[in-house]
Amino acid sequence: MGLLFSFFTVTALVLIVLIGVKAANFHYLFGVIVPYAAFLTFFIGVIYRVMQWGRVPVPFRIPTTAGQEKSFPWIKQNAIDNPSTAFGVIIRMAFEVLLFRSLFRNTNTELREGPKLSYGSTKWLWLGGLAFHWTFFIILTRHLRLFFEPVPMLIQIMESLDGFFQVGAPVLYLTDLIFLGAVTFLFLRRVIIPQVRYISLAADYFPLFLIFSIGFTGILMRYFFKTDVVGIKQLTMGLITFSPVVPTGIGIIFYIHLFLISALFAYFPLSKLMHMAGVFLSPTRNLVNNNRAVMHVNPWNYPVKVHTYEEYENDYREKMKAAGLPVEKE
Amino acid sequence: MANPKPEELARIDYKPPKTGWMDTPTVFKPGIFPNACKQKSLETVGFPNARQWSVKDEDWKLPENWQEIFIEGLRERVSKYRSFRLFLDICVRCGACADKCHFFIGGGDPKNMPVLRAELLRSVYRKYCTTSGKVMGKLAGARELTIEVLKEIWYYAYQCTECRRCSLFCPYGIDTAEITILARELLNLLGLNIDWIAGPVANCWLTGNHLGLQPHTIKDSFEMFVDDLETATGIRVNPTFNRKGAEILLVVPSGDLFADPGTFTTMGELLLFHELGLDYTWSTFASEGGDFGFFTSNEMAKRLHNKIYEEAKRLKVKWIIGGECGHMWRVWHQYHNTWFGPVDFLEEPVSPITGTKFENTKSNKTVHICEFTADLIKHGKLNLDPGRNDNLKVTYHDSCNTSRGMGFLEEPRYIINNVCNHFYEMPPNTIREQTFCCGSGSGLNASENMENRLRGGLPRANAVKHVKDKYGVNMLACICAIDRAALTTSVDYWVPGVRVTGVHEMVGNALVCKGEKKRTTDLRGDPLPGMEGE
C-alpha cells in the first residue's frame, strides 16, 4: 500500500507541474513562489525540529560503548569507539556521520542445519548508503554553480573531477550514474528483502521515489532534452539575489525538476529525513564514556521515596540482634 | 509444560506473514510471555493501579482512563528524555538491526526485529504526538491506541532484554533498550508489570535484596560458605557484616549469596579478600548490587539503589567495591553518579594493596571487583596456580551491560588468562561489544516464559557449542549473576556438558593462600586435576 501510494503521489506531483506550467502558465508560481516557500519551510522546519530536540534534556549519559573503556594505563583503550574525551567523541561522530561507522559493522545472520548460526560481514547496505549520501552531496554542491557568478574555482574543479572520464557530450558525471544506481539499490533491497519490505512504510518509499525522480529529471535535462541553461541561471541568480525573474523558454522538464526538489525540501522537516540532523544529537553516540570519573547532571533529577536503614532496622532489629549483627538502637 | 526438543525449537521460520504488521493480530503464545505481577508486590512499593490480573484473561482490569494515562505518560517522557524522542523520530527503517536481536534470531517473530518492536510504540507516538500522524493516520505509520495495541506493546516490551546489541549496529545509535525501558515505565503506570520483576522489586524494597533474604538468613548463608571454604582450603575466613569504620563496602548481586554457581563466586571473593587481609565489610541492608527497579521505571531504580550510598555513609567506609553483575554495572556506571552525586562523603578509591588510584571512578567511588583483582595480579600481589584450573577449558561470555554500557572487556580476560591455562574465545561476532544476551536479562528469567528464554539463548549457546566442538570447552565464565542462572539453563538445553562459572570462582581455585592445607578439591568440592583419587 505504501509503495503504490508513494508512487502515485510522486506521479501526481509531476502532473501538477505539467498542468500548472504547460496548461495554466503559472511560471511565476512554480519558478519563484513554490521554491521560496519550500526553502523557507525547510529552513524554518529543520531549525524548529532541532530546537525541539535540543530543548529536551539528556537526563543520563548513555553512550553505547563499542570497545574497551579507559581504565588502567596498561590496558589499551579504544579511544574512538569508547571515547573518554570530547576529542574522542568528535572523532567518533566524524566516523559515524562521514563514513557510517556503525553500518560498516553490519553482519548477516545465517541459520543452517545443526543448528549452526553464523554471522558474515555484509557491506552492501553500508556501501549503497555511503554512495547515495556522498553522491547526493556532491551533486548538490555542483549545483551551487547556478548561484554564483563567476562560478567558484572549487566547484569547477569538482566538476572536472566528476567528469574525469570525458565520456559523452555534455560530459557524463560519474556521480549522476552512481547516485541513480544507489537509489535504485536502496529501493530494490526494500522491496526484495522480505523483512525490510515488512517494516517499510509509505514514508520510506516516498522519499526514494521523489529523490529518484529528481535525479532522473536532472539527467534527462542534462543529457537528453536540451534546456535553456542561460535562462535557468538567470532564474536561479534572481532567486538568490531576491530579485526574481522568470525568463521565457525554459523547458517544462526544468520546472518538473524544480518542483520535485521543492517538494523534497518542504517534506524534509516533517519526515524521517531529519535523521540528517538527528544523528548529531544521538545520546548513544555523542557522549563521553566517563560516567564514573565525571558526574553527569540530570536537570530534572528529583528526590524519591526510599526505604531507609532506620526503617530496615526497625523491621529486623530482633532478628539482627539474635544473629549477632550490630544495630544502631538496642 | 515441557519444552520442545532443541531440534524442533531450532526450526525457525524467518518469513514474515502475508498481512502487514498492523493488520496481523498478536497472539499470546504460552511459553513466550511471563506472568502478571501480584497485587501485593505493587502495593508494597506504592505503585498505581495495583490489582490481581492475569495475562491470559480477556479483561486486564485496566483503569477506566487507561488510554489517557498512557498517552499523557508518553507525552511527558518524550519531553524528558532526548533519547526517547529522537529515537521515536529518526528511524529510517533500514533494517540493519533486524537480525541482530537474539529473540528474532532464535524465534523469527518479525515483531521481535528491534525496528518493528520499536514501531509498535512509535506508531502510537505518531498518532498522538505528531502532526503527520494525526492527519495522515496509517499512511504515516500511525495507529490508535486500542486495547489490542496496548496488549501487543506489553507482549513485546517483555520480549526485549535491553541488551543494546541493536544499538551498536544502528547508524543513528537508536537504542531499543531506551524504548523498552520507557515502554515498561508507561505500562507500570497501568499496573502492568510482570511477577518476576515486581516480586524482586518488592523484596528489594523491604529486605534490601531481590531474593528477600533477611539479615539473619544472609548471615546463615555465609556461615555455610565459610564452612565449605574451610573444607576446601583449610582456611577459616571471617567476614564481617554492617561493620562501621571498615575501609571498603563490598556489594554483590544477591543471586551470588543464594544459588549455585553464583555462591562459588562469593566464596572465591571471600577467600581472596581474606588472603589480602582487606579491611572490608558486607552489608545485610545494601545486600543487592543489582536493581530490578531499572526494569520498572527510572524512579523505582533510584528508590532501590539509594541504600548503597546510604549504607556506605552510615558505615563511614571510604569507597565501594561492586561484585560480578551485568545490569548492576550498567546502573552503577551510567546512572548512579547522576542520581546520587556528588558522592563527596566517600574518598577517591585507592587500592590499599597496590596503591593504585582508580582514576576512572574518582567521582563515583565504585570499583568493579574485576578491576580490583586485575590490578592485584598486574602488581604481582597474588600467588596464583592456574594449573589448579587445568581441568577447565574456559570460554568467556561478555555481559551485554558491561560491554555495551561500559566497555569492560579486557579486565576479566586478563584475570582469566592468569588463573587458568586453557582459555578460548568464541567467534568475534559473538563477543566483546558484539556479545549476545544470555536470553533472560532485564527481569525475564522467569520459568513460564522458558521457551522464549531458550530461543533468545540460542545465539549465545550456539557460539559456546562452536568452541566446545572445536576446543573441547567445558566451562563458560561470565561476570553476571543473571548469566550464571540463565546460561546454566540455556547451555544445559542447547550444549549439554558445559558448566557456568563466575570469574572469581576461578580466582578462588587458583589462589594459593598462606597456611592453606593441601588442596584436593575446588570450591565446588570437585577434585582438582590430578587429585581425582585423593
Image (cartoon, helix red, strand yellow):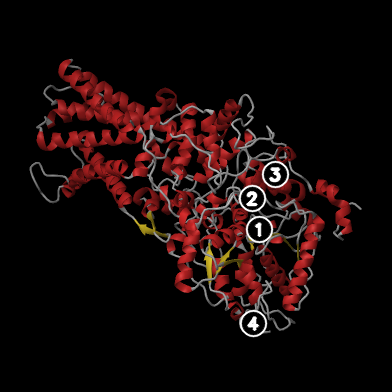
Separation of disc 2 and disc 4 at Cα?
47 Å
Residue pointed to by mark 4: B532
Crowdedness of circle 4 by 10 Å Cα count: few (<14), some, many (20+)? few
- Residue at image position (51%, 32%) is B149
Residue A81's disc number: none
What type is the residue that disc 4 sits on?
A: Glu
Residue pointed to by mark 2: B336
Under circle 1, the secondary element is strand
**Subunit bearing disc 2:** B
Q: Is residue B530 above or below residue B17?
A: below
Give the mark, 2 or 4, whose residue is nearer the N terminus.
Answer: 2
B124 sits left or right of A167 in the view: right
- Residue at image position (57%, 60%) is B487
Residue pointed to by mark 1: B366
Give the mark, 1 or 4, whose residue is nearer the N terminus.
Answer: 1
Specify the quadrant that holds the C terminus of chain B.
bottom right
Separation of disc 3 and disc 2 at Cα?
11 Å
Which numbered mark, 1 or 3, is in the foreground of this view? 3
Residue B208 x/y as whole percent: 74, 51
Question: Looking at the image, do the residues carrying marks 3 and 4 touch, with CB atoms under 8 Å apart?
Answer: no
Crowdedness of circle 1 by 10 Å Cα count: few (<14), some, many (20+)? many
Label tally = 4
Separation of disc 1 and disc 4 at Cα?
41 Å
Under circle 2, the secondary element is helix
Residue B118 x/y as whole percent: 47, 40
- Residue at image position (65%, 78%) is B527
Question: Looking at the image, do the residues carrying marks 1 and 2 touch, with CB atoms under 8 Å apart?
Answer: yes
**Subunit bearing disc 3:** B
What type is the residue that disc 2 sits on?
A: His
Give the mark, 3 or 4, whose residue is nearer the N terminus.
Answer: 3
Instruction: Specify whether disc 1 shares its chain with disc 2.
Output: yes
